[in-house]
Amino acid sequence: MAEIDYRRRRYLRRLAIGLGLMLVLAIPAILHSHAAIESILNRPPDWVPDSLPEKAEFNEFTRRFSAADVILIGWDGSDLGSESLQDAVALLDPLCQQPNDLLDEDREPLPDWAVAKIAAVQAICGEQQPLKWCRSGSNMLDKMMASPANLPRRVAVARLHGSMVGDDGEQTCMIVSMDESALVHRRHVLPVIREMVARRVDVPVESVAMVGGPFDGATVDEASVRSVRYFAPPSAVFAAILCFIALRSLPLTTVITAVAVIGEGMVLAAVYYMGTPLNAVLIVLPPLVFVLTVSAGIHLSNYYLDASHEHPELNRTGAARRAMRAGLAPCLLATGTTVVGLGSLVLVRIEPIRIFGAIASMGVLGTLLMLLLVLPGAMVLTDPRMPSPEAEPKDTWVTRIRGRVRRRIRKRLARPWPVIITFVLLTIVLGFGLRNLETSVNVPRMFLPSSDIRTQYEWFEENIGPTVTGELLVSFPPISDDDDPLERLELVKEVHKTALEQESVDGVLSPLSFIPPVKSGASLSATASRSVVRSLIRDPDSSIGKLGFISRDEKAEVWRVSIRLPQNENVDHGTMITQIRDEVDQTIAENELDATVTLTGHVAIVQKAQEVLLRDLFRSFLAAFGVVAVVMMFLLRSLLGGLIAMLPNLFPTIALFGCMGLIRTPLDIGSVMTASVALGIAVDDTIHLVSRYGSRRARGLGQIRAVFGALSQCGWAMLQTTLVCGLSLMAYWFSDFVPTSQFAVLMMGLLLAALVGDLLLLPSLMSSVLGRWLARSVGADPKAAIGSDAPRRRKPFDVRRLPRRRRARQTRST
């Protein structure tokens, strides 16, 4: 008795220490998780490692030209030469590092509200001029029509068609280049700029269309933050309610939910401590840690409830001690395996995913240690409310259904091979879908068709032209006095023409767009024309040089050809890029000049990010699967046993992602991490079931009886974890951000697939001849018995319940 009292006090003391520690951790979990959320910044080009040639080309492009981070702004009435368009350009000019030289010097001063808004933007960015430059289609048209180009208006408008001017020859837009300070705070800056333009041109804010890479990122940032703020609290509350229904214990529910919520906040705080901006990949961290924490807590709690039910002679402290002894090894092994699997993500070259793997591993391990600290105390405070062993079991429809299910399970365990063969065939069929799996970071597709961003992109595509920008960079050696710029211009002209001939390209801008036609012949006017063009090309301060289409340094002279591709969810930009690159390479090869061409820009680097993401995730999953398999071999002390135990863990990933490949549903930024999540969840249940099976076999129970006993003990906990975690995450399904909504659906599907694999496939494997290699688990402790594994006591058989003829035969035989 003294030992029991001492252990009870120790458990309660640990609970008090744990609650105090959680109160301390709640401060950074709240404050610094909020700071991490506010730091959110989605920039896929930054995710690609610098070691890749495509990233080096993109970095070179951003270094030479200030056109990598631009936004396009337009509205009904932003026509060529319109007063409203010039007013909008003048409004943003004070924020630009390069003033617009085509604005009238005698324009009226800005109104007071505009000055206040400009000051607000400067305060948000922390700089006086957070924009690089601001131009409009009218500005470009004026430069083309002015000396020395002197292009006719009709010709100039035709050259701008598809990039800055729409099909009607009048509708145009503004183009704004953003500095780094504005990009970092784009989520707050761009709404203010949009509001300023709308008020200046006297149209509703929703009538001003804004597109481009920075705007896409800001929209994804805002949607991600909204998902966390609006759906994380109801998800936690719903999980707590479901957990209480499953466990019927307020102390256990409170402790598990509190640890899971603190874990969510701490992983976000860890992102803040690492100095990495939060992004749409890392936003998956909180629900992942929440799911795995709740899963471990429910499993440990069921060990206590089972011990109290099967061993009524034990008091609460004794039952808690027996539960911790039985559940400690499988929980540590399951969490350790999950940590190893998540840690394998550091092999991915995409930076956010590497950080995800590191923080998720620490978060899952930390929450398990916290659960082990506080759960015994919560168990001591929980009254299991189990019926007395002398009480006669009631004959209800529930008990009758339960009896039929138990008999059906025992019958199925006696013939396991049909189930095993069915799962193998199903896995092979669904595995063919993995070949068609693809990723997508098409930003408009991440939102509902009625969303504001989809509406703005549709307006731009219909009224002005394509909105996806690619850059063809034609590089020459540094120009010397002996080189003729016209020869280089002729090659760029061929590249311009080749790009425009591609079916996927609807608009092209290059130095050729702003240079007058070069006359041939030996006449005085032709010679003078060629001389003027040579001067325009060589002079960096000329009208051509200031537009930013030619860059020179001691290494090379680079000419920029900007192409526009349609923003359509049914368009494969990867195929477009490959076709354009091949055609342009052939054009360069046919020319005798020493020149090279590269295709870069936002579309190219995002496409490369997709390719690296899919390939590296496949590689990291294989690595995680291999490492987990090795751990399972160590756990079962058998090479073959480890491979057999991995079959149920592989099924959820192949089933779900194979289905996605078969129905051609691409992976997005919200679902790319779910493969590793599925592996972690499946391994958790597998280790608990294998550990209980090994313990029963070590006590000398028969194979089928050991499987049935392990399934009876762990099956209910596995079902509870699936329902609690899956249904609580379904709160995110109501988000208007498609990646978040799809993540919730995928997680529910993965949890169900993992449950099916562990409830059907794994017991069949254990009850077959393969089960002998699954019985020698490291966590098998014969003394840590929870269930008695004895057949349940039945009521005396009553022959009066039989039909009359069978009753007569039974009576005669008696």
Image: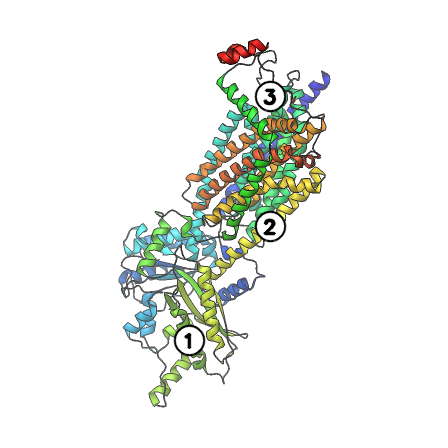
List the residue tagged with mark 3. 381
Q: Residues within 10 Å of mark 3 (few under 14, many from 20)?
A: some
Q: Position of residue 475 (x, y in %)?
A: 50, 73
**Quadrant showing the N terminus:** top right
List the residue tagged with mark 2. 620
Mark 1, secondary structure of its residue: helix
Q: Position of residue 201 (x, y in %)?
A: 29, 56
Say which residue appears at 48% left-offset and 61% top-offset.
604
Q: Is residue 519 visible?
A: yes
> How many marks on residues?
3
Q: Residues within 10 Å of mark 2 (few under 14, many from 20)?
A: many
Label disc, if present, on residue 494 of the rendered structure: 1
Indicate which disc, 3 or 1, sits on the residue closer to the N terminus: 3
At label 3, which amino acid type do we have?
Leu
Indicate which disc, 2 or 1, sits on the residue closer to the N terminus: 1
Proximity of marks 2 and 3: CB atoms separated by less than 8 Å: no
Proximity of marks 3 and 1: CB atoms separated by less than 8 Å: no
Mark 2, secondary structure of its residue: helix
Looking at the picture, tell me which residue is in the foreground, 54 or 392: 392
Vertical order, 121 against 65 (above or below): above
Label disc, if present, on residue 240 of the rendered structure: none
Q: Is residue 370 left or right of residue 75?
A: right
Indicate which disc, 2 or 3, sits on the residue closer to the N terminus: 3
At label 2, which amino acid type do we have?
Ser
Mark 3, secondary structure of its residue: loop
- Quarter of the rendering containing residue 115: bottom left
Q: Position of residue 47 (x, y in %)?
A: 53, 55
At label 1, which amino acid type do we have?
Glu
